Amino acid sequence: MKIVHAASELFPYMKTGGLADAVGALTGTFAQLGHEVSVFLPGYRGALAHPLAAKAERKFRLKVEMGDQYLSGDVYSFSPSKNLTVFLIVRDEFYDRKYPYGNGERDYEDNSDRFIFFCKAVVETMRLADLGADIVHAHDWQTALLPLLLREAERRFGVTLGMKTVFTIHNIAFQGLFSAACYPRTNLPDELFSMDGLEYYGQVNFMKAGILFADRVTTVSPRYAKEIQTPEFGCGLEGVVQTRIDDLSGLINGVDSAVWNPASDKLIPARYTASDLAGKRACKAELLKVCGFDPAFQGPIFGMICRLTEQKGIDLVLANADFFTGKMCRFVILGAGEKRMEDALKKIALSYPDKVFVCPKHDETMSHLIESGSDFFVMPSLFEPCGLNQMYSQVYGTVPIVSRVGGLFDTVRDADEDPVNGTGVMCAPNALELRGALERALRLYDDKARYGAVQQRGMARDFSWKTAALAYETLYRDAL
Ligand code: ADP
């Protein structure tokens, strides 16, 4: 098949979260399976400077209609591996920035223009490059206009493109909600700015377009596919999602074993396998050292890696700060995001430097060290479309402590409830339940045989992307 993907993040060129990992791994796996894959990404500063993009060449000049203006852009492309072409849409005014969506404090004010332009540039490049795609797969609100723009292009130019479109919701909490003033920039017909179209209480909602107009809608776990049909998790779009239940599926992400595999991971101090955990002990020793903890400490290390935001349950962790400072354990958290949370965590680390370590930044190497060197991984998300770290943790022999939501529900089993198959510790997403789960984790750690068995079962699990990619392949064929 000829498969086109468009996304605002793509590992290793631009990443803020799981979206980048998912799109990077999925497209790479499709290419390995022999499909002809093109991936579109905005030409961010970091992406253009990435060593793999060094061979990128300018292929096309674009003129993109934006309301009553035409804006120019360039398309650079390169092929990082067989069957895979990356297209970077370059317009410095929009993308020559360090961060993809905002400066840390607030979102960029021109985000609607930046992503309308990007989606239109993808449509135009597909035409110029004569890509002849079978499937066009858009991810999250930033590319949610793409299925509709393709359909509109067919209508405007009286052509049938023959492709099918897929839209994947990686997180319905981010919808791309903008003032109605941006609507004319889409050049879409006025009648689509309505309740049955992009309008959402007087504003423009990009994600709504993806859900309504793609041929197939997917999200990243079966449980989340159910949850987003409810007011509790649908973030106001539950009614829109319900209109597509016949075309909606939940396909779990995988683990990119080229990046996340303790047997071959170059970013960790020692490699290891389920049958020989000596390397894991070396990783723990290094983690204790990097955090400035007592190198002779024998108890468990609880690790955490995430965006510092309400979704990830940081407030539940803060409410349980006395657990981490009072018990025989150590806690290390790697995360950047909301200042309030960062300050609160730093305050605890400052008072208890021998027990708590906070690393308030994005750090790929540190994330691998925490996954490998910790004994438990803490992930008490309030909602979690799929989640990746709970899967990485199982693969790295680090027992996950997770809330029973979304992809966490689908990928972890509680070791007390299911002593035969359990691979983690689960709780409801509230502070009290998390406390119970942390206490249970301590008891599990004290029972070395039981902890070892839980760890081994996690390491034996298969989260390969191949399984995930085959599920998408089936969906594509079904759509076609
Ligand atoms: P989300 O996409 O909601 O952020 P996921 O669990 O799906 O959550 O994916 C998060 C990804 O980002 C994981 O690969 C995780 O290791 C990584 N990550 C999150 N925060 C950091 C950080 N501060 N430094 C390095 N990697 C991080």
Image (spheres, rainbow, N blue to C red):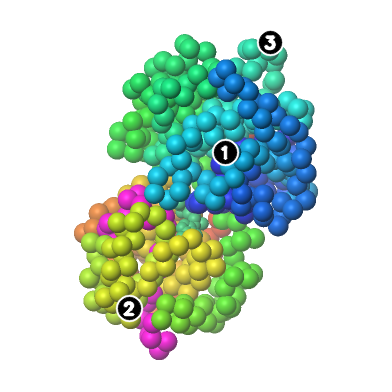
Q: Earlier in the sequence, mark 3 or mark 1?
A: 1
Q: Residue at x 39, y 66 (%)?
A: 333
Front-lying residue, 347 or 300: 347
Q: Is residue 236 above or below residue 340?
A: above
Quadrant housing the N terminus: top right
Question: What residue did someone put label 1 on?
Answer: 94
Secondary structure state at the residue bearing disc 2: loop
The amino acid sitting under disc 2 is Pro
Whole-Å distance between the Cαs marked 3 and 1? 31 Å
* Disc 3 residue: CB within 8 Å of ligand 1: no
In this orientation, does residue 295 appear? Answer: yes
Q: Is residue 255 magenta?
A: no
Q: Residue at x 46, y 78 (%)?
A: 290
Q: Earlier in the sequence, mark 2 or mark 3?
A: 3
Residue 68, percent from left and from top: 57, 17
Whole-Å distance between the Cαs marked 2 and 1? 42 Å
Q: Is residue 298 magenta?
A: yes
User: Foreground mark, 2 or 3?
Assistant: 2
Q: Are marks 2 and 1 in contact (CB under 8 Å)?
A: no
User: In the image, which residues are magenta?
Assistant: 293-317
Question: What residue did someone put label 3 on?
Answer: 158
The amino acid sitting under disc 1 is Phe
Q: Could you say which disc has been placed on residue 353 in the image?
A: 2
Residue 67, percent from left and from top: 55, 19
Secondary structure state at the residue bearing disc 3: loop
Q: Residue at x 63, y 23 (%)?
A: 70
Q: Earlier in the sequence, mark 2 or mark 1?
A: 1
Q: Residues within 10 Å of mark 1 (few under 14, many from 20)?
A: many
